[in-house]
Amino acid sequence: MTRSDTVPTPATSDAPGLLTRLLRAREAGLIGLLLLVTLGTAAINPLFLGAGSVRDLLLNVAIIALLVVGATTVLVMKHVDLSISSVVGLSAFLTGSLFMAYPGLPVPLALLFGLALGAALGSVNGLLVAYGRVPALVATLGTLYVFRGITYAVVQGGQINASNLPAGFLSFGTGSVLGVPNLVLLVLVVMLGFGAYLGSWRGGREYYALGSNAEAAVLAGISVTRRTMTGFVLSGAIAGLAGVLYLARFGTVDATAGTGLELQVIAAAVVGGVSIGGGVGTLLGAGIGALLLGVMGSALVTLRAPGFYQQAIQGALLLGAISVDMLVARRAARHLQAAPERDRRTK
């Protein structure tokens, strides 16, 4: 795949500047809120910024941040993937079962197994949405339960513990390079790679064109069906990889592994500026959103606040992010409507 500037952007030459400024201001605001929460909590409890606490925080955020990559790819197409938590759970358990059958299995092969399994499950969503024309919300809600049901059937009340896993795999999950956990480094590599793909490459930019205006994307020569199918396969593959990392991180999994992650991931992406209306958002903002929610959750635990506060704050941030999306869309629409009038005045 090569770089190309021929894919049309969703708006005219005037609109991207406005949207870019608004999104950058939003990301700057998230960074400011992140610093405020971090420094405020550290002022109350200095241990919050201790090396061990920071390491645990990064490890906890890593899985969510990785899943945000796939969620962002789907959301910018104006779709949603609710099945990712079930893919994580099934991938984690089957990877553990694979290690039990083949204790000498190399870690890279386990990661590839998770990617392949996730891609296969994601292709089911892609077939339903791209070819079956089933709304993504309905299709992925259905596969959320189907995949979870398969997991329960496979697990049959069992559980995989750290004692069942090879030491090399566990050391990969707990190891670090120059003080940075391996899982965090791997997630950063994936995020940087997909960030460059979505922002600078023709295939990545087609997701934005599709989410902004599917009809215009067709007229521009973009294969909407193929691009939609690819997006869901990528989301599934990333969720499968996250399942392997989930197993490496916690060492113990059962049929409930990953339950509820889909809501956290979507909340992180939307809070980070990825519009549920499609066509808008960056992985940088989504990553900041994941980190912000993780820091807030850890801060509440450090301050011994009741657990329901975390859900309440996540809900408030989600509502605020959606409100901002609506304001941005309306302001951009007014800007576009005013553009012809400005052009006539300048002539």
Image (cartoon, rainbow, N blue to C red):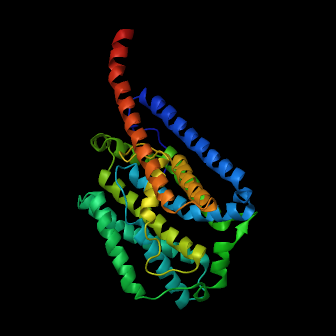
x%, y% of residue 63? 54, 64
Q: Is residue 7 visible in the rendered structure shown here?
A: no
Q: Residue at x 40, y 40 (%)?
A: 323
In-front residue for pair 331/314? 314
Q: Residue at x 72, y 65 (%)?
A: 52
Q: Residue at x 58, y 58 (%)?
A: 300
x%, y% of residue 178? 76, 63
- Name the side, left or right, on which 5 lies relative to 128: right
- Name the side, left or right, on which 194 lies relative to 151: right
In-front residue for pair 346/61? 61
In-front residue for pair 71/6? 71
In-front residue for pair 9/324? 324
Q: Quadrant of residue 191?
A: bottom right
x%, y% of residue 244? 53, 74
Q: Quadrant of residue 19?
A: top left
- Name the side, left or right, on which 195 lies relative to 324: right
Farthest right residue in view: 178
Q: Is residue 229 visible in the rendered structure shown here?
A: yes
- Name the side, left or right, on which 103 lies relative to 144: right
Q: Residue at x 58, y 39 (%)?
A: 28
